[in-house]
Amino acid sequence: MKKRKVIIDCDPGYDDAIALILALLNDKLDIKAINATAGNQTVDKTYKNLIRICNYLNKNVRIGKGVVKPLFSELSDASHVHGKTGLDGVNIPNDIEMPKLETSIDVMKNIIETSTEKITIIAIGPLTNIALFIINYPDLLNQIDEIIIMGGSSFIGNRTPSAEFNIHADAEAARIVFESGVPVIMAGLDVTEKSLIYESEFDEIAKLGKNGMFAAEILRNYNKFYLTLEEKFNGVPVHDICAVGYAIDSSIFEGKEYHVDIECEGKYTYGRTVVDFKNRLKKEKNVKVLFEVDRDKLVKMLIDEIKSENGEVYNA
C-alpha cells in the first residue's frame, strides 16, 4: 500500500493532540515531520507538548519549531480553552529529553525539495509557518500536493462573531496560503462542529488501553470548556481531527470548490474566510470547502486506530 507523504503543522492543544493520535497511529500516512506553531499556547509550550505526545505514543518523528508570533501582530492564544500548558490536566510525562532544535521552515524545505513525491501539508493551527515557507521558497510550491487546513468558517466564527480561531490568529498568513496557488482544503467550523465525540463515548475510549486512556483524558479536559458555553454540543467537537481524517479517507467528507478570500482589514470581520457562494467576484476557485462528514465513520476511524497496537489500516 502506498502511503501519503505528509508534514503536519500544529499547536497542541487538546484537539491537536487527538488529531496527532489518529495521524501517528494510522498506517495510511507517511509522516515526514511534525512542526509546532504558536496558537493555542506559545510556541515553546506547543513544541514541548508535541514532543511529549510523540514520546508517549513511542513515535520517532522529525520535529520542527516554528516562529513565536504571527506575521504582523502579537500572539493572542487560547489558554482559556487549553490552559496554561496547552494540555492542562493531561497526565503524560513532562520531564522529557528535547531533540536537536530545527526550525519548521528548514524542516519543510529539506523534506519538500528532496522528496521524489509530492508532499501533503496538514495544517491544524495558525498558518504562520506555512506562509513563511511560501514566501521564502515559492519555487518549491509545485512539490506540494495540497494543503489541508483546519480553519475558517463560511458563516459564524468562534474567536469573534465572524472569524474562526486559527485564521483569526494570523489572517495575513492565511491570506498568503489561500492565494498561493496550491490547492487548499478548508475543514472549517462548517464541518468540524459536526465532528463530535459524545460524552457517552469517553468511557468506551478510556477502556482501550494506554492510548485510549490518554485520548479520554484529553477529551474530558477539553469538554470542561465546552460545558461553559451557552451553545451545548453534548460532547466535544474535535476540530483538528477533520483535517487528518480527510487526508486518510476523503470519501467520508463532502465539500464544494469556491473562491475564498481572507479579510484582513475589517474592524469586526478581521480573519473571516469570505466564501464566494454566488461567484460574485468571478475569481478562480481556490479552496475546497468541507461541509459534511460521516461522524460515525470518523470516530470509528479514531477508535479503530486506538484499539490497534500496531496502527492497522482503517477500512470504511
Image (tube, rainbow, N blue to C red):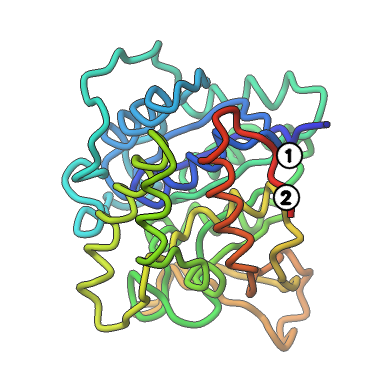
Which one is earlier in the sequence, the residue at label 1 or at label 2? 1
Is 154 left, or right, of 225 in this rendering? right
> Which residue is identified by label 2?
182
For residue 80, the mark is none
Q: Quadrant of the N terminus?
A: top right
Residue at 24% of width from left, 77% of height from top? 229
Q: Nearer the viewer, residue 181 or 215?
A: 215
Q: Residues within 10 Å of mark 2 (few under 14, many from 20)?
A: some
- The kind of residue on which mark 1 rests is Ile
Q: Quadrant of the C terminus?
A: bottom right
Quick check: 269 above or below 90? below
Q: Residues within 10 Å of mark 1 (few under 14, many from 20)?
A: some
Residue 298: x %, y % from top left: 60, 59
Q: Nearer the viewer, residue 237 or 179?
A: 237
Q: Nearer the viewer, residue 235 or 285?
A: 235
Tell me the element at label 2.
loop
Residue at 41% of width from left, 79% of height from top? 162
Residue at 42% of width from left, 58% of height from top? 166
Give the distance between the C-alpha atoms of the residues marked 1 and 2, in whole angstroms.
7 Å
Q: Given contact means CB atoms under 8 Å apart, are the residues at marks 1 and 2 in contact?
A: yes
- The kind of residue on which mark 2 rests is Val
Tell me the element at label 1.
strand
Quick check: 308 above or below 199? above
Residue 153: x %, y % from top left: 51, 73
Residue 245: x %, y % from top left: 62, 52
Write down the quadrant of residue 47 in the picture.
top left
> Which residue is identified by label 1?
144
